[in-house]
Image (tube, helix red, strand yellow):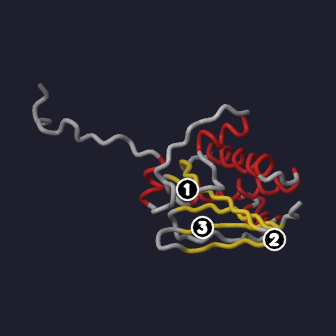
Amino acid sequence: MMGGMAGLEGMEQPWPRSGSAAARWGLPGADRDVVPAPAGPVSAALDLIGDPTLDEVLLPSRPESAGTARRLTASVLLHQWALSPQLAEHAVLLVSELVGNAVRHTGARTFGLRMLRRRGWIRIEVRDPSRGLPCLMPVQEMDTSGRGLFLVDKLSDRWGVDLLPRGKTTWFEMRITDR
C-alpha cells in the first residue's frame, strides 16, 4: 500500500487527445473520431491526423510538424482539390513558412491548420495562441533569418494576420482557376 496516495485512485486523467483541445476552442466536430481508411502514403496523413478542409487540425508545436503540414497541404491541393502542381508547390512552401513562424516564435504547445476553398480562391490558415505579430523582414536581413513572410508576400495573392481573443490566425489566399 502506498502511503499518502489514498483516495487518489482513478484521479489520473488520460492525456488529452488533440480532439479535446479542439473542443476547448469550441470548434465544430471536435469530438469526432477519425477512422483511418486504407490509403496511399500522402493521404495517410489525412486519415491519421484529420482533414483540414473539414475542421481545424491541431498539430504539436515541434519542427517535425512542418513536414506533416506540408504533406497535408500537398494531399488536399493535389488529390482532393485537383489543383496544379505549381500552385500546390507554392502553397506547400508558404505553409512551411507560417508553421515555422508558429513553432519558432510562439512557445505554444500546439498550432492549428485549416484549409478553405471558395469559388476562384483557396485560403490556408495557421492559428497559434500567441498574439505576437509576425513581421515582414527587409530582404537584406533575410540572409541570416530565413525567407519568412517575404515569400508569403510574393507567392500569395493576399495574406494577413487576424488577432483572436486568445492568439492569432496567420493566413494567405491564392487565386485558382476553377475547372
Camera sees residue 55:
yes
Q: SS for tag 3?
A: strand
Q: Residue at x 73, y 63 (%)?
A: 117
Q: Amino acid at mark 2?
A: Asp
Residue 24 vertical placement versus 153 (above, below): above
Find disc 2 in the rendering and name its residue. 157
Residue 16: x and y in percent read 40, 46
Q: Is residue 56 left or right of residue 139?
A: left
Tell which of 36 and 155 is nearer to you.
36
Of the residues under marks 1 and 3, which one precedes in the sequence? 1
Q: SS for tag 1?
A: strand
Asked which quadrant contains residue 12, the reply is top left
Find disc 3 in the rendering and name its residue. 169
Residue 103: x and y in percent read 58, 54
Q: Amino acid at mark 1?
A: Phe
Residue 55 vertical placement versus 157 (above, below): above
Q: CA distance from mark 1 to mark 3?
A: 10 Å
